[in-house]
Amino acid sequence: MPVYIRKNVSYTPPSLDKIQHEAEDDYNLDPELQKDSLPQPYRMIDKTLIGLFDDTWEVIAKREEERVAEANKVRPPAYKPSVQLNTAVPNSQHPEKQKLSYATCICNSGDGQFIFVGLPCGLVVVDSQTHGIVCNWEEDGAEMASLKSYTLGPDTHMITSIDDMGVARLFAFTYNKLFLIKVLNPSPESENKLLVNKLEASTCGDYMGVVMENAGTHDMWLEVHKLPRDTWVSDLDTIVTAIKKKEEKEKRDEAMSEETESVAPSDVAPSKAETEDGGPSAVSVTNSVPPIDTGDQSQDPLSGEYKFGAPQLIMKVKPPQPITGVGVSSLQAACGKVEAGEVVATGNNVLFTATHLEQRRSVFEHLHDNLAKYSTEEETQIHQCPHFHFLCAGKMTPQGLEQANLEGRPTVVAVWWPGTSNLLQYSLIKTAKDVEFKADLVWPVTSKITCSQVSMDTSLIAIGMENGNVLIWDRYMGISRGVVNVRDDSPVVQLLFLDPALYPQNPGDWPPYPQPPSTYVLARCANSALYTITTSPHQTLQLNTVSLSVEKDDDGITLLQPFDKHPDLMLVVTRDGSVQVRDCLQGNVVCQVNLPGSHELTAPWEPIITLGGQGQSLFVKGSERLKAGEESEDPLGGATESEEGLVFVYQLRSFPSLDKYWQTSRPHQPLTVHVTIDQRAQAILSDRLSQQLMRKARMQERWAQMKDEIANIHQLKEVARMNAEKTQIVKFERIPYPHYQLPLP
């Protein structure tokens, strides 16, 4: 029988290496898995339910972990308020709005004796110790949105305010009386009215910076005004003196009236002839006083109408123009357009043409066309509200602008605009017809500026950048202290110079004259991480971690304010409305301030809170907590005008956890130490003379030791000479006699 075998077919048995090994876990523990899979669409429904169950279980497990961690957390001591301020302003024209419970903003005076409270219809001054209303100012529609206080002189304070309509006002408070000095921008009815977005003054009240905005065109610029500070103080003294005389006279007249009423009418009744002829009567009182002569002012002291000297506009700073192309063809033509001076360039005169920049803009829009829809108009605006600082004279001031009589007074203003990487410096003592000045100095940095801060004496300036770097300049010496990278993933949003008394100073024995001390700079990043930077003039910058970044957004910091008289402490407010007192260097929460259960912190992102009594008391505005099912009228979730609120006062002095901080005394350490060459030479000479007696004793001791040393030297020389002679004798004895060899015959 024939057998058919296919050609080119191999019947090689399979290799043992290619046989798959049986898995040890090739079995099912769940009996349900032995069943066949469900048909569609039940299979998809089952898969969706299982995924939903897993996600829910993860959320439950995460919440349980957070609950356990919150329960095991070491909580700081919490304290409740001791006083609630809901006092109505006496003799008010708007009693329904003039209550402290309707406070819109709050700030304290420099000496800590008074608290200035902004209300929907005016301003109120409250004593920080007795919590009583000292005086008030009212005007219909003047709802205060911002308040700041500055010290003009002893018991004299200047208050700057901005209301909700952008109208700025200057007030003066002295001898328990409040005076309206000036309204900077009376609101006109025209479309091009000017609004004030920011108002700050120098520490002593010599200069004032106002950020103005045109409501019609939305143009923004900075105006710098010189304030007649000394004139205001003298005018206020004259007004207060006249008012006191007026009040004393009224009191005497009232006392005389009371005495007259207490006596029988028959005993003091005037004659009929005297009364008919207009003669003097025992009960007649004259309340008028001569007008006050204070220059332009000639009103009655009690009339409330006073004319003070107006601020003088000395400078107007406009935002930098965007970079545009110029029609130049060579480098020499571009350099010719740059003015001579200390400014190297402003970025406007470059070799880029307008066509080149337009092409680059078109390419950018084409590449990022899919992301353009996510950008907003606010992000596209380059220039926003500028930041500025008034600085005293230093080594970085241009030559020719130093004046000895301006020591301790501001001489320059430093300005930077958001979205730029240049810090501009303008001189305040130059005179010119045109108030629009160009910058005297330009400080370029490596990234966009996000924050800046100057020390109390303006000798140091710190600049925070978007890339997480912090640059510190010593303006007094004109050198840079250095640059330190705080974080790479978060920009720096706030910088604070701490008191130099917190830094352990080591002056050393040499040199004998004082040296500039070191201090800390507290840096806060956008993720609420806190760091301290050591600014020592003799070493590089050092970075120390105070607290790490927060995990939850509710724990983010919205307010960070150090205590004035107690540099170890700082006030912290978080997004969830908690108010804490922390240690500046350690970062731990020392204590926490709790509001009653029926109230919550008003607007945690912009809290109405301030310290009073030099850090001894705390004033906090709280709003009534909404009940379940109620909705706030404010879209941001804050307190509305109709909600009832209270101002709570906390006596920090009575908190047991803060006792060790009140008992700690910190010696004053000035950041600026000015030692001239003559003072240095005198200090070195004095140190030399103070060591003269010690040097004389050392010289006598040295001369006494010199005799023994000379004797030892002579003895050593004699021993060496004797040893040398012995060596020569030995060599002479060892010399052999010469042997002459006779020639052989």
Image (cartoon, rainbow, N blue to C red):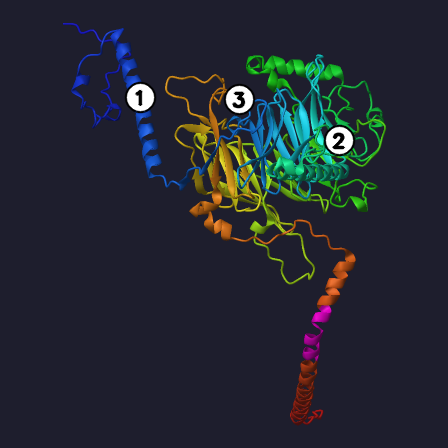
3 or 1: mark nearer the eye? 3
Identify residue for label 1: 56
Query: Is disc 3 in contact with disc 1, using a CB cutoff of under 8 Å?
Result: no
Disc 2 to disc 1, C-alpha distance? 103 Å
The image position of residue 84, as x and y in percent, is 46, 34
Taking the view exactly as shown, the residue that stands out farthest to the top is: 1
Under circle 3, the secondary element is: loop
Which one is nearer the viewer's eye here, 663 or 668? 663
Picture quadrant of residue 40: top left
Viewer-side label of 3, 2:
2
Say whether residue 697 is magenta. Answer: yes
To which residue does mark 3 refer?
96
Query: Where on the picture, by quarter, is residue 703?
Result: bottom right
Find the magenta span and give its range: 688-699
Check disc 1 and report its element: helix, strand or loop: helix
Judged by its main secondary structure, the magenta piece is helix
- Whether residue 75 is visible, yes or no, is yes
Per the image, the residue denoted by label 2 is 273
